[in-house]
Amino acid sequence: LNTYQRHGIAKNILLMLEEISEFAFDNTLQDCINKALRLLERKTDAKLLDAGCADGEITLRVARTIGTNSVYGTDIDGRAIKYAGKRGIIAYKVDLNHALPFKDDYFDVVFSNQVIEHLDYPDNFVKRNF
């Protein structure tokens, strides 16, 4: 094999490994989300906050699980917030390293997934919000 052929084979192997990794991560993530959803109780009059809602896909799964239509989300990514808003979520651009812009005890259910590892001070986030 010449250098170009070896490079092509190596590139294809890397692409396959990337796809396998994404598949494994997605399955693991979905498994974690499903386990979290099983812990939730129905509360149709609840106000739900998803702290770190991204595009709102998981937020809506949480809302359906508890049976509420009062759904809020926060995220640092403005594009994600716009998409979540289009899905019917009352969405705010918020840096979760700082206090949330809501009154204490405003929400009945606070959900947060795949967020804490991105925070500068995760202890503060947990103390303030849970």
Image (cartoon, grey):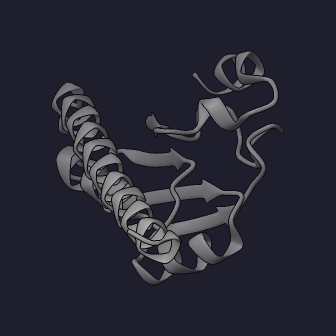
Name the one closer to the observer, 114 or 12: 12
Residue 28 image point, x, y percent = 26, 37
Residue 16 seen from this side: yes
Q: Is residue 45 visible?
A: no
Position of 19 relative to 24 (above/below): below
Residue drawn at point x = 57 percent, y = 21 percent: 130
Q: Is residue 108 left or right of residue 30?
A: right
Which residue is located at x 62 percent, y 55 percent? 74
Can you name the residue that lies furthest to the front here? Answer: 1
Along the line of sight, the residue nearer the viewer: 11 or 106: 11
Residue at 49%, 68% (x, y): give it.
7
Is the residue 81 above or below the residue 113 in the image? below
61 sits left or right of 48 in the view = left
The residue under the point 71% across, 26% down is: 125
| View extreme (bottom): residue | 86
Residue 35 against residue 42 in the figure, above or below: above
User: Taking 110 as reference, is 128 above or below it?
Assistant: above
Count of numbered circles on the image:
0
Image coordinates for residue 104, horizontal then vertical, percent: 68, 32
Q: Quadrant of the N terminus?
A: bottom left
Q: Position of residue 40 (x, y in %)?
A: 23, 31
**Front-most of residues 79 and 43:** 79
Horizontal placement of 36 versus 73: left or right?
Answer: left
